[in-house]
Image: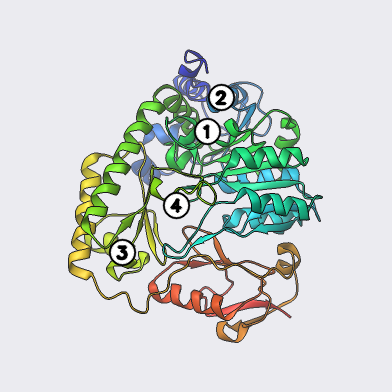
Amino acid sequence: MNRDNQKRAPIYEALEKFRGRRVVPFDVPGHKRGRGNPELVELLGEKCVGIDVNSMKPLDNLCHPVSVIREAENLTAEAFGAENAFLMVGGTTSAVQSMILSVCKRGDKIIMPRNVHKSAINALVICGAIPVYVNPEVNSMLGISLGMEVSYVEQAIRENPDAVAVLVNNPTYYGICSDIRSIVRLAHENGMQVLADEAHGTHLYFGKDLPISAMAAGADFAAISMHKSGGSLTQSSILLTNKGVNADYVRQIINLTQTTSASYLLLSSLDISRRNLALRGEESFAKVSMMAEYARNEINRIGGYYAYGKDLINHTSIFDFDVTKLSVYTLGIGLAGIEVYDLLRDEYDIQIEFGDICNILAYISIGDRTQDIERLVGALADIARLYKKDKAGLLSGEYIAPLVVKSPQEAFYAKKRSLPIRDAKNCISGEFVMCYPPGIPILAPGEMITEEIIEYIIYAKEKGCSMQGTEDQKVERLMVLT
């Protein structure tokens, strides 16, 4: 990586030059640099709305970049060690779906873990590809699914030699990493491409002593949530491709669904954030790792909680662990993760990333401070002292291995009827059910609705999880195949 090159931010520089010209706007957006919407200016500021502009020759066009956006993408590819990079303004959902749609068509098989984000299964609904799930091992105490074991991937490849790709989470929301280097080698030996969902792995490209990144491991594609740990604005992401991938075709796929009115606020935030990470990322993420490790040690001293880390590594289902993830098991104090999540927000004004049935996740990144960590640790100690109770009756287990009966596309578009959730037992689901975050489906279209799944959904609702995916907003009824 050329550090002198990385000092540039072409989109940001072009916007600054454009701002100085005081161009009279007879184009969209209709707020005309904020003059038509003073309350928006009051909220966001003149500087912000002043660069909320439309594509034009001096600012390039994301759908077919030839100047400043293309230059910014080239710098991004260099910074991440990729062959090509695409700036994405539809979130990492659009990046995940674009990489799947780039390699899969109707009827193709793709090998993937079942604990994927809903965006991956949604891509299968769109294109008609068939998932071959490598059901991950589950840590029964923590209630989380682990990584893809190489031997399981090898078995899936052996049983499905016609599969076109393997998708890997790198890392999972909770920090669990698979042996992606070995999975890449295995897939490539069998003529399959490797797609990495790195929504939670931007920092792997810049930090030291962190798990290997997908591009360094030789993966063909990686979807990067730059806005999560990389510091850009919400909804801005990156799609990376490696050598041997036809980048021009990938851009065509992206343009099937991408907006033709890309936000320059999002694009410039990606440009500036890439520059920041390229120049200061190693130092920044060293501090993030240090803060997360400090928090882990302090939380484990409280008693009742278990903030897990590298101690989980077993070199198979947990090949490595991302220490920047502050994942904490809470059932030891008799509270579900979602209950601790609610207490932190409602009683202590602390907003963490999510709480599930067994755990909470506090996202530590480049914007955190030691005093914030201290406040979180203090609040958790207070909750343990004030709210601790007997854990009897609490469920554990975030992952239930599904029985796939039909493809996601076939089930999603099939004729359906609505049933009360308890009456849906042994029916085939025609929709998703998930807690969000983390957005990993409990139930996906085409899967059998079992008693265990019904009880889990009802329990998660009662504990206060935010449920999504169903036509019924109250999640009291499910759409099932007729």
Q: Select label 4 or label 1 by which is in front.
A: 4
Whichever of labels 4 and 2 marks the residue nearer the N terminus, that label is 2
Of residues 354 and 73, which is closer to you in this image? 354
Q: Which residue is mark 2?
A: 72
Whichever of labels 1 and 2 marks the residue nearer the N terminus, that label is 2
Q: Select label 1 or label 2 by which is in front.
A: 2
**Label disc, if present, on residue 174 of the rendered structure:** 4
**Label disc, if present, on residue 108 of the rendered structure:** none
User: Which residue occupies 42% across, 68% down?
Assistant: 465
Q: Image quarter for residue 61?
A: top right
Q: Which residue is mark 1?
A: 267
Q: Would you say the residues marked 3 and 4 are in contact, meaning their CB atoms lie under 8 Å apart?
A: no
Q: Amino acid at mark 3?
A: Val
Can see residue 122? yes
Of residues 342 and 361, which is closer to you in this image? 361
Whichever of labels 3 and 1 marks the residue nearer the N terminus, that label is 1
Whichever of labels 3 and 4 marks the residue nearer the N terminus, that label is 4
Marks 1/2: CA–CA distance: 9 Å
Q: Secondary structure at mark 1?
A: helix
Q: Would you say the residues marked 4 and 2 are in contact, meaning their CB atoms lie under 8 Å apart?
A: no
Residue 275 locus on image (x, y percent): 46, 24
Marks 3/4: CA–CA distance: 17 Å
User: Which residue occupies 80% across, 50% down?
Assistant: 161
Whichever of labels 2 and 3 marks the residue nearer the N terminus, that label is 2
Q: Residues within 10 Å of mark 3 (few under 14, many from 20)?
A: many
Q: Secondary structure at mark 3?
A: helix
Q: Select label 4 or label 2 by which is in front.
A: 4
Q: Which residue is mark 3?
A: 340
Q: Amino acid at mark 1?
A: Leu
Q: Select label 3 or label 4 by which is in front.
A: 4
**Vertical order, 78 against 299 (above or below):** above
Q: Secondary structure at mark 2?
A: helix
